[in-house]
Amino acid sequence: MDNREHPRRWAILAVLAVAVFVVSIDATVLNVALPTLGRELDASTGELQWMVDAYSLVLAGLLLMSGSLSDRFGRKRLLVIGLVLFGVASVAAALSTESWELIATRALMGAGASAFMPGTLSILVHVFSDEERPKAIGIWGAVTALGAVTGPLIGGVLLEHFWWGSLYLVNVGVVAAAVFGALVLVPESTDPTARPLDALSALLSIVGVTALVYGVIEQPRYGWTSTEVLTGLIGGAVVTVLFFVRQATARHPMIDLAVVRNPRFLGSSGTMAVLMFALTGSLFVITQEFQLVLGYSPLAAGAAILPVAVALMICSPLSPVVTKALGVRATVVLSLLVLAAGYGTYAVFTREYGYPAMVAAMVLVGAGMGLSQPLVNDVLMTAGPPEQSGLLSSMNDTVQEMGAAFGVAVVGSVLATRYASTYTLDGPEPAKHSLDQALEAAQSLPEEAAKATVAAAREAFEKSFSASAAVCAGVVVLGAVAAAFLLPRRIESPSEGSKAADGTSARGAVVARETAV
């Protein structure tokens, strides 16, 4: 047995998969509950938006620091602390009676998730051998994507039978199981070469990423040229540049710039951003297509997305097999082209084709995601020394959060702009802004006028839906071109070329520090 293989590695993987699943669900489960929360908590549109965004904003802002802390103070320790904080915040969220309380507890949940998310992937690097690592990361990635895709369905089922607080109470049992499993099974590991945490680097990373994400998530409300959005984007970009300047000059930098400049890191992180951009952006419009055009209930709309999850779960374990046959670069490029074909199928979809056409598109999307995501995660996690796996994992998670935020903002902007330009019928002013507002306005119109308004709105939405899907396809194709230039033909062992001064491998030094509980 490889000396890096942990005898309970598959049980450890199960524990970590449970942890990432609950976080992934929480990123999307709230979307189906917004109308209910608006009624129950008397929440405004802005408050509803922040119920969703507070979680993502805090999660993204703290990830880099959390990953660095996990390498220094123990990946298992941060994993357990983060899970406990997430569970406590979930209980508080379920018991909220005011909008501000739910927003605050959602932010606290984001802080908990940021503490344990980096550890879930970095721990895998230390308990699996190079041969089994791609399969393990494939399962991890599939579970992560599965949680995001099935979040709306799980939310719909819970709302169908229970009150809205059940969306959060269900987390408690899952978190308790993950904490118990982590304490019993997961070994502790740290970076034996860890240096003191540079406080200024940590502060700059938090401010920079938070400002960028804030600017992106506020775009749908204020527009790209608004003061709020430009302040976030420009300010975040400036602070991020200062962060990298600090890394080049600090005595104890948070990240190794040599890793950031590595083409493997640039290619894999860029591809991951593309994947999350397309997946999150498309989910944003597809759920509207199912509910507003095809007339599905929230529960039915969540169930209708399942072909993506099924194809993803089938293809994800096949990623290492295909990689052995074709190599890393060819497999990623091929899978991205399959993904682009799925979004291209969305782009030519019209209501006359019905749900079967959407199934064909979703199968292609799921297959492309399933084949590419595990491999891209593996390339990224081997782009630097294994003793920095916590930081690498947090950088991976940060890139995913940024890609997801830009996906919703850009695709949503295309959807709104295209809808406004193609809706030509004179009528109620709200109908010119979005399909859901048109459907609501039509309820107060005479029958003939209502039919004309709904027909014009749905036609405009179908054109805007096609434009949004085409943008996703185009971004994925550009990602495939970049991957063809940046990604390697094969994945080297993470420990190759990483030798300590005494001749032992850096990974060996790390493993020597690991002790099973």
Image: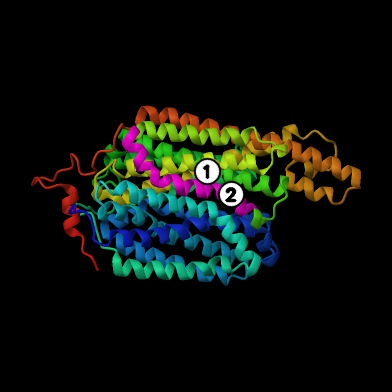
The magenta region covers 301-327
Of 398 and 320, the residue lying toward us:
320
Report crowding for label 2: few under 14, some 14 to 19, many 20 or more residues within 10 A (C-alpha): many
What mark, if any, has residue 279 been given in the picture? 1
Q: Residue at x 27, y 37 (%)?
A: 258
Comes first in the chain, label 1 or label 2: 1
Residue 77 at what x, y percent from top left? Answer: 31, 64
Q: Is 517 a magenta residue?
A: no
Specify the quadrant of the image occupied by residue 346. Answer: top right
Q: Disc 1 and disc 2: Cα gap in Å?
A: 12 Å
Which residue type carries mark 2?
A: Ile
Judging from the image, what secondary structure is the residue with disc 2 in?
Answer: loop
Q: Which residue is mark 2?
A: 305
Residue 314 seen in this snapshot: yes
Q: Residue at x 27, y 44 (%)?
A: 250
Which residue type carries mark 1?
A: Leu
Residue sitting farthest toward the left: 502
Judging from the image, what secondary structure is the residue with disc 1 in?
Answer: helix
What mark, if any, has residue 197 been given in the picture? none
Residue 267 at what x, y percent from top left? Answer: 37, 34
Residue 504 at what x, y percent from top left? Answer: 11, 47
Q: Is 311 a magenta residue?
A: yes
